[in-house]
Image (cartoon, coloured by chain):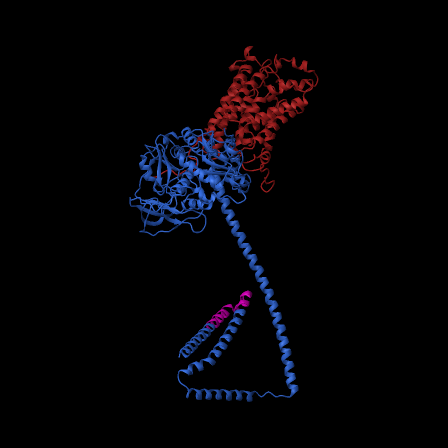
Amino acid sequence: MTQMWDFAGGIHPAENKQQSTARAIRMAGLPERLVLPLQQHIGDPAEPLVEVGERVLKGQKIADVTLGMGVPVHAPTSGVIESIAELPVPHPSGMNDWCITLKPDGEDEWRERHPVSDYRSLDRETVLGLIHEAGISGMGGAGFPTDIKLRPPKDRKVDTLILNGAECEPYITADDMTMREHAAEVVAGLKVMAWILRPERCVIGIEDNKPQAIEAMQKACEGTQIEIAVIPTKYPSGGEKQLIRILTGLEVPSAGIPADIGVMCQNIGTAVAVSRAVFDDSPLISRIVTITGDAVREPGNFEALIGTPIDHLLERAGLESRKANRLVLGGPMMGYTLTTTAVPVTKTTNCVIAATEAELPAPPPEQPCIRCGQCAEVCPMELLPQQLFWYSKSGEFEKAEHLNLFDCIECGACSYVCPSSIPLVQYYRYAKGEIRVQRAEQIKADRARERFEARQARLEREQQEKEQRRKERAKAAAEAQAKKQAEAEKAAAAGEAVDERAAKAALVQQALERKKAKAAKASPTGSEEAPAHEDKPDIEALEKQLNQARAKLDTMQGMLDEAKAQQADNVDKLERAVAKNHDRVQRAEQALADARKALASATESQTSD
Amino acid sequence: MAFVQQSSPHAHNALPTSRVMLWVIIAALPGLIAQTAFFGWGNLINVVWCIAVALASEAAILKLRGKPVAFFLRDNTAAVTGLLLGLSLPQFAPWWVSAIAVITAIVIAKQLYGGLGSNPFNPAMVGYALVLISFPVAMTTNWAEAAMLFQGAPGFGETLARIFSASQTTVDGWTMATPLGEYKHKIASHTATEVLAHPTFGDGIARGWEWVNAAFLVGGLLLVFLRIITWHIPAGFLGALMVMSLAFGANADQYAPLSLHLLAGGTMLGAFFIATDPVSAATSHQGKLIYGAGIGILIYIIRSWGNYPDAVAFSVLLMNFAVPFIDYYTPPRAYGHHKARRGLPGKNQG
């Protein structure tokens, strides 16, 4: 008998599970189209690897996450990619997002598969890689990528691996039916995860309102060290933090993760997916979905391909459109309403309730809070819902945060019991959203301030450097002046008069002589040798030209930088000058390169001759 | 096909405020029956009169405030305020004293502070304290003699006539000092045995009062059982009163005995029906214990060393003052935290 603890608060809502457990899991069949959202879990969206019109095989990877956290998406059956477009996705806001639409061809043709029979012969990284490549993300809540979850931080050792079969939300029976019908796969998947993590203890927690699932699991676990813990039915025992408390007596630290206390929770559906990924090389392309509510004639569970539109499932369950008043995705405590049945089943879709008005009636109008404290009595996180409501409503978010607003798991127990029918959870979501926005703005403001301060510091530094340079230049100039003067004095003292005119005349004379010599040389020699001979002095000249241009460009660049630092008015002009000089350098480089090429080809032709 | 858009949770199963208040009224019935049995028709007439005035003044002030009258009247909270005053006031309290108490409670203590849920003070006790201070004679000389119904007590018509008559003539043999008042005033000059010989104490602890208190205790336990109130406030209240009495009142020739403290006056009505008014009480379990204990301690202090023989109203009001303070320093430790976050943000982060 496993030792168990109780968690604070909790409620006992009407279970409404019997409606969907009367029938065995049915195959949902092939819908006309499969709509595969590129983002089906927290983290980053996947990018398509296929193009419209392309034929894909069942199990073929059609989208993958290249940057960031996420898992790939696979084709649930063979068919043709019809479109990649923004379509309605399951989301509380009723928004559209990028989806790949696949038109099945009915062949259901698999890609090549390589099942692993003995995963123990592989190393753990390889198996984690298989899990990642199979596109497995948590199939209960937010859909955290399973391979990442299975790699706890290096300094944390997972002692207890918990498989969450509590399924405490009313109406939902997907895990219950999975345990009844796929117990062996659940255990196989759990064993793979246990092999990866090497925990000391492996527990499956199941609420005592699922005797058949408990029996099936006990049978499947015979001869293993896996414990089956039958926990008392109380909502929300399936909340990760509550289940950990029940099974270990420990509490996950606020803002921490279960691995901090050596615990990890995995979902029943996830275990099945891991088993199929390893033993069948079948990626996550289908899941069990509960379709229930008084507005369907034949409620039950369906094995549906990911991407199956909800209306296909509702039709299979016998939806009576006239009676359907509210469409809830998830359970009645934490699920959200859908605006359309056109949204697809994703990796995290566990239940759809088509409720009549009598079944889930509109709540009565909100009355003033009478501080009765019923909410605090049922809060499984031991918060003060009433004060949180007060502060959230009045915008005193700092006080709400102080009273641990962010520990709220939004289970809805407080709203469920509120005698004044105050939509408490809605107020908390609002406050959380506002605080997140404020934080984001604070971060932005801080960054802007840091940038401004850094710029101020830089400008000051540059100013100082400029001052320094100017001083140095002034000093150098003064020295040069002094030197020149000294030389002039020296020359004067030597009595050597400098005749500029004579020097110029001499230069002109030299140039003339060179030209003559060139002309003389050109006439007797052959035309082949001449260019090669002539090129040599050309290259030197070009090199000199290039160096000069470069020097000038450097000077201009320096001036420009200085002007920029000072925010001078002539920046524009200097920029133009720099550009001009840049062009000049390029031209000079080009000319030099051309000349060199010509010379090289000439020499080559000479040597080959 | 248009579906309803609603935020989670989609399922609700609350006991609405109106039903909560109805249960309070039902739980107070044993006490009212005991009062009627031992002290005549006075309390019943008071209760009906007070509820009528409460509903009328609530309706009038809601209309003045531009609030939906029917919506708020249906919550039964005004009726409960009227009921509590009717149960607390002296049996022969003149109609206008009761009316002033009720109108003060509803109009000033409740609605002028913002209506249901916004009043820092217990409305019924504000009304009670006002008339107790303003009309001390009417509030002390109109307590019915116990067990009259069995001994030719004034009938329904006589009682009604007395409450609603213009002149308030005291009729001997109809009224009597309350046990707490009698003990308080006589013990300074008499021994306990001499004091207890007075017929107001009867053969038991406090003639009639002991049964009334026992009946309110039963009704109160029903509320705890139904989870309409938690046990914390009554436990703190009665526990502190007992501790104080045992610590200071061992000498019966000087102080009223513990049994009298518990079973005379408004002790049980106060502990289970008045102090537990959620709007003006502390909220966390720890806070409720402290709040209840504070009331118990103040009751003992005022009864023993103060000017008033009973003290539920003043004690409750004084502790109402302390509620925001208590709430700041008694939040529960939340899941995943080492200790509770007491006080204001930025201090003592836990």
Foreground pick, A42 / A197: A197
Could you tell whether B40 is left or right of A344 in the image? right
Question: Does residue A358 lie above or below A556 as drawn?
Answer: above
Q: Quadrant of residue B96?
A: top right
Q: Where does the N terminus of chain B fall, quadrant-wise? A: top left
Q: Residue at x 62, y 77 (%)?
A: A480
Percent x, y for residue A549? 50, 74
Could you tell whether A481 is left or right of B162 in the image? right
**Which chain is in blue here?**
A
* Residue B37 is a magenta residue: no
Count every numbered label the image shows and give the total: 0
Q: Residue furthest top?
A: B151
Percent x, y for residue A24? 35, 32
In this picture, which residue range is highlighted in magenta? A560-583
Foreground pick, A88 / A174: A174
**Which chain is in red here?**
B
Percent x, y for residue A532? 43, 80
Q: Residue furthest left?
A: A106
Is residue B264 visible from the viewing direction of this image?
A: no
Foreground pick, A483 / B111: A483
Q: Where does the C terminus of chain B fall, quadrant-wise? A: top right
User: Does the magenta stretch mainly form a helix, a strand or a loop?
Assistant: helix
Question: Does residue A65 lie above or below A230 as drawn?
Answer: below
Foreground pick, A184 / A305: A184
Percent x, y for residue A341? 34, 40
Could you tell whether A486 is left or right of B229 in the image? right
* Residue A562 is a magenta residue: yes
Is residue A152 visible from the viewing direction of this image?
A: yes
